[in-house]
Image (cartoon, rainbow, N blue to C red):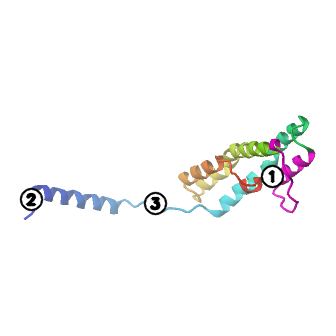
Amino acid sequence: MPSATQAKIAVFTSSTGAARTAVSEPPVLSPDPAVLVRVRELIAARSPEIARPMLDDALAAGTITLAERAALLHEVLGVTDLPPTQLSLAARRLRDHIRAAIALASPALARPLLDEAVAAQRLTPSQSMRIAQHLREPARRPLSSVV
């Protein structure tokens, strides 16, 4: 025969189990790939607007050469059929600043698309937040793959 404590535990366990079955959890959505593609395309389209002023300022200051400016701009645009250009230390630092600027602007650029996807239930709010957080992190790879 069970003791009084064992009976209480059994009752508590069965009542919690019943509560779990009565409340259904919302299905977990995987992020809609079309949303992610649209976000990436939007950021890629807006990245040259972010990079050009920085490149122009560095060129005017004599920090980078015209060839380095062209190479970095092509990298932002995703042009891959050009021969690799040897970049100076200043140009490599500028590339890092451009990456950081694009990463900083990306969540704001993507926000309308992410909000629209949440409203249309193609993303959950937490997925939207995770995507925005991921966009904030500057990547250590070619600029064309940042976006």
Q: Secondary structure at mark 1?
A: helix
- Magenta run includes residue 53: no
Q: Quadrant of residue 117?
A: bottom right
Which percent across, then down, holds residue 118? 59, 54
Q: Which residue is mark 3?
A: 26
**Residue ranking furthest to the left:** 1
In three-dimensional space, the C-alpha distance between marks 1 and 2, rounded to whole angstroms, equals 72 Å
Which percent across, then down, holds residue 67? 91, 49
Rendered image: mark on residue 76: 1
Looking at the rendered structure, the kind of residue marked 2 is Ser
Q: Quadrant of residue 63?
A: top right
- Magenta run includes residue 73: yes
Q: Which residue is mark 2?
A: 3
**61 to the left or right of 111:** right
In three-dimensional space, the C-alpha distance between marks 3 and 1, rounded to whole angstroms, equals 40 Å
Rendered image: mark on residue 36: none
Which label's residue is closer to the chain start, 2 or 3? 2
Which label's residue is closer to the chain start, 3 or 1? 3
Determine crowd level at label 2: few under 14, some 14-19, many 20+ residues with C-alpha closer than 10 A: few
Q: Which residues are magenta?
A: 66-90
Looking at the rendered structure, the kind of residue marked 1 is Val
**83 to the left or right of 116:** right
- Front residue of 131/120: it is 131
